[in-house]
Image (cartoon, rainbow, N blue to C red):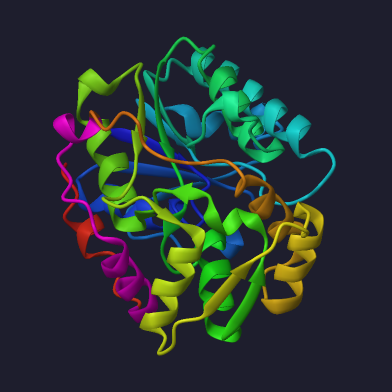
Amino acid sequence: MRVLVTGATGFVGGRLVPALVDAGHEVTVLVRDADRYDPPDGVRVVEGDLLDPASYAAALDVEAAYYLVHSMTARDDFETRDRQAATGFARAASDAGVERVIYLGGLGEERNGLSTHLRSRREVERVLATGTYALTTLRAAIIVGAGSAGFEMIRQLATRLPVMVTPRWVRTPCQPIAVDDVIAFLVGVLDAPETAGETFEVGGPEVLTYAEMLRRTGRHLGHEPIIVAVPVLTPRLSAYWVGLMTDVPWRVARPLIAGLKNPVVVHDDRLREVVPVDPTPFDGAVRRALAGEEGSRADAAPA
């Protein structure tokens, strides 16, 4: 199948492209700067900007497209930019006759008062659904893997702080998922026509609090941090705290922290009936991320 991947230089997109190639698909990628992207053999590269649909018209001669682009900084205009990019893409893909679009969004129930970034992801989902193609949405919580901003924050905190005085968000339930499992689902839905037009939730086999993720990640690093939760740290102060204690920039830490107040748990796991993926336990995902062994499952993703 002829497939387009947007966000090909990102944490998920960078793993998805070679998995699609290995599955036998003809892959095109859309990047902003082709000189800074080293594509796998056989991948066609188109340079363009999602805010300028005319710039990437040549990339849309495909049957299916993955939309993996979203803002992950504390810019004041991120919601507007995300909305404009999704609106332009929906129109351009519809005009080009793209048959399917696959979007990776975020878990979280809107009744729980989603953070601004999670709310924006949900808005992007609604905008993409206005196209004439069939939209498949996968919603995930923290994706565990080397290069994931959320996991990197957990890893660095667990590495650097033997004792942590933390905000209340450490008690929030979360259902993390290994990046290799996400890739397997993303590749698998492409050849499962019954997933067209559907929304699915994906997660690992365990529901954990962020405190438990910090402790268990710490064990893999040789020590288990002591965590004391206090109610006085606001999201803004928490973001400054993370920025001070880790290499995660404040502009990235702030939206991450804001989203941690929302429970992100799978309530509908029916995708496993269509795309069978043996879920990776959290400790296994952490071991693979720390050892740099990710990719074997992606290589074996269903064609």
Q: Residue at x 61, y 54 (%)?
A: 169
State the extent of the magenta-drawn residues as a range.
271-291
Provide residue 112's location: percent of width, then percent of height: 59, 30
Provide residue 250's location: percent of width, then percent of height: 77, 63
- Residue 282 vertical position relative to residue 223 in the rendered view, above or below: above
Provide residue 129's location: percent of width, then percent of height: 50, 16
Among the 4 quarters of the image, the one containing residue 267: top left
Q: Residue at x 42, y 85 (%)?
A: 221
Provide residue 130's location: percent of width, then percent of height: 54, 11
Q: Residue at x 33, y 48 (%)?
A: 182
49 on left or right of 100 = right
- Residue 200 vertical position relative to residue 5 in the rendered view, above or below: above
7 on left or right of 117 = left
Decide whether residue 288 is among the magenta residues.
Answer: yes
Q: Quadrant of the C terminus?
A: top left
Decide whether residue 145 is among the magenta residues.
Answer: no
Q: Residue at x 53, y 83 (%)?
A: 159
Among the 4 quarters of the image, the one containing residue 185: top left
Among the 4 quarters of the image, the one containing residue 295: bottom left
Instruction: Using the rendered image of the protein, determine whether residue 245 is visible from the camera's viewpoint.
Output: yes
